[in-house]
Amino acid sequence: MTTLTVALTRVRPTVGTVFSHLPDGADPASGALPGAPVALLPRASRLVLVVPAELLSWHPVSLPPVAGARQRAVLDGLLEDQLLDEPAALALALAPKRAADGRWWVAACDKAWLAGVLQCFEQAGRRVHRVVPALAPVASGDGAAAARWVVCGTPEDARLQVADAAGVLSVPLAQAHALLDAQMLSAQEVALEAEPAVAALAEQVLGRPVRVRTAAQALREARESGWELAQFDLATSGGSRLARRWGAAGRALLQGRRWRALRWGLVAALLAHLVGLQAWAWRLDETLQARRQQVRQVLTQSFPKVRTVVDAPMQMEREVTLLRQSGAALTAQDLEPLLAALGAALPEGSAPGGLEFTTGQLTVKGVALGPEALALLTARLAGQGLSVRQDADRLVVRTAGAPRAAGQAPGAAAPAQGASR
């Protein structure tokens, strides 16, 4: 697995920004670092970015035990009074382990700058695996030096970076005597390191010997630290990275010049779709109104006395019902006349057990009459054009024009037809 370590610049990078980098396997003690824009950087399995020390601020906090999802909100509350900017505008990163005094170091940098860096590499198809600081606070009790002084940059822009148990401080080398405590500057046990380009200037300004440390060695030391500055919503792995990539793709689609034609095409298609839907709805409404008018015309033409149409189907149903009721006339072959004639002619106390009716014929069950009673009943109904026949306990009353059942002899009882009543 190969690793490429890239030194970031102080300004937000662009496509043409040249990055100093340390390829895997290169000799850290040899010469200056090569430089290349992001698209031409060497390919490697892992990509590590190094943030300049002057872009970071360091804050110790006493962090209570909270879940990872709530750590960011807790850190915002703890650092609200220590930060010059709003916590939401800063990218915060928690130290890989707790300090000896029980507190945690928190690194803070401009969130927009760090997000722009990650976006620049993502757009170039280069996945960032880690983001580390160029210099971190020195943990007390490590057995190493109590502090580290590092001079880096160019003779025109040399900076002194002091890392100790109190944090990391970066000041211009020319103003070191004015900004730093005299006792700190006179501490002889502090080791002074400097890049080759500013080693002589560092000895002259600080008045002490310098151990030369190349920029490549500095990048390798930073890469080997356990820090990760891209945390929480800027994490370079997992769901946060995927969400950031989708967000970048969405912004490119909404704002990129290369997608302008697509955006206009989508807007035109949406407008055409809306216009088509509106025309279709108007056509459907027009058809519905025409159908309603046809129903009203059928109602008013069928029933001229209906002047006001409120609910055409309901009014038509009511008028048809009234028409049926008013035009219905009973005939001699209907059930009601036969029941009325039989009820008036039967002897008192006769209680039928059941009725069967077909057109022109009524069968009464459970009535057994004697010969005299049957003769009297026959005489009474004969005057109304009805004939009576008894079959055991069944009386069959028929009108003169009632059809006989198929296969029924003139003197036989008609078979049961119709519903029992």
Image: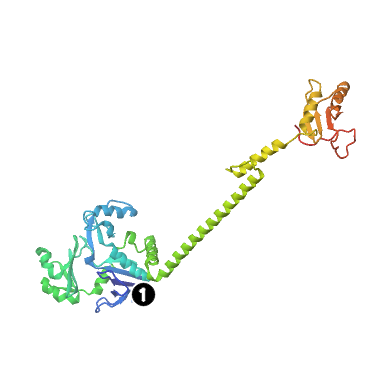
Residue under label 1, please give it.
43
Type of the residue with mark 1: Arg
Q: Which residue is drawn at 80% across and 27% down?
A: 341
Is residue 126 in view?
no
In the image, residue 180 lies at what x, y percent?
Answer: 12, 64
In the image, residue 360 lies at what x, y percent?
Answer: 81, 34
The image quarter containing residue 267 is bottom left
Q: In this view, does 360 lie above or below 175?
A: above
Q: Furthest-right residue in view?
A: 410
Camera-side residue of 139 and 242? 242
On screen, residue 123 versus residue 358, left or right, reads left
Q: What element carries label 1?
A: loop
Q: Is residue 397 above or below residue 152?
A: above
The image quarter containing residue 249 is bottom left
Q: In this view, does 287 lie above or below 269?
A: above
What crowding class fits label 1: few (fewer than 14 Cα within 10 Å), some (14-19), or many (20 or more)?
A: few
